[in-house]
Amino acid sequence: MADPARLCRRLKVLKDQGVYYLCLTGGEPLLYPALLPALGRAWDLGIHTLLCTNGWLLTPASGRAHKIAGLDTIAIAKSFFRYGKHSNPP
């Protein structure tokens, strides 16, 4: 798991190199304890963010917190809803 301070420093480097969009995937990015600060730092730098998740840990409250922190877009894996758990399709 990335060190939060290092991640925030690297976001600045990415911005300086011309990165304007960042997709956060996993494992499961919602398990990362410093996700909200990282989203906030990206937002402060003008980097648009997309979070790809299975949606298991999303709640209305966490969704609002991610939006407030600066998350632009969230993609939820459809297979989670189809099969109800992490599994390969039959």
Image (cartoon, rainbow, N blue to C red):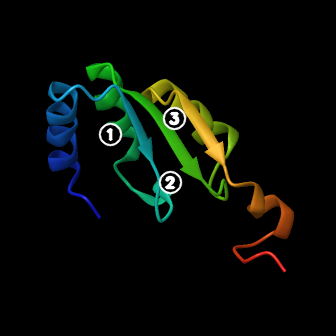
Q: Residues within 10 Å of mark 2 (few under 14, many from 20)?
A: many
Amino acid type indicated by mark 3: His
State the CA–CA distance, disc 3 to disc 1: 10 Å
Q: Residue at x 75, y 72 (%)?
A: 85
Query: In which quadrant will I find the N terminus?
Result: bottom left
Q: Are marks 2 and 1 in contact (CB under 8 Å)?
A: no
Tell me which residue sits at (14%, 34%) in the image. 13
- Which residue does the numbered mark 1 point to in the structure image? 38
Q: Position of residue 69 (x, y in %)?
A: 43, 29
Mark closer to the chain start, 3 or 1: 1
Between residue 18 and residue 80, name the one nearer to us: 18
- Which residue: 72% across, 77% down? 87
Which x, y percent locates residue 27? 47, 65
Regarding mark 3 in the picture, which secondary structure is present there?
A: helix
Three-letter amino acid code at the position of disc 2: Leu
Name the residue carrying label 2. 30
Left-right relation of 34 to 54: left
Residue that mark 3 sits on: 66
Q: Residues within 10 Å of mark 1 (few under 14, many from 20)?
A: many
- Foreground pick, 54 / 31: 54
Q: CA distance from mark 3 to mark 2?
A: 10 Å
Please give the name of the residue rendered at 22% of the width and 47% of the height, measured from the top-left corner. Answer: 7
Does residue 34 appear to the left or right of 63 in the view shown? left
Return the x and y of residue 90 as percentages of the image width and height.
84, 80
Q: How many residues crowd around disc 3 within 10 Å: few (fewer than 14), some, or many (20 or more)?
A: many
Residue type beneath disc 1:
Ala
First of labels 3, 2 by sequence position: 2
Name above or below for residue 9 compared with residue 6.
Answer: above
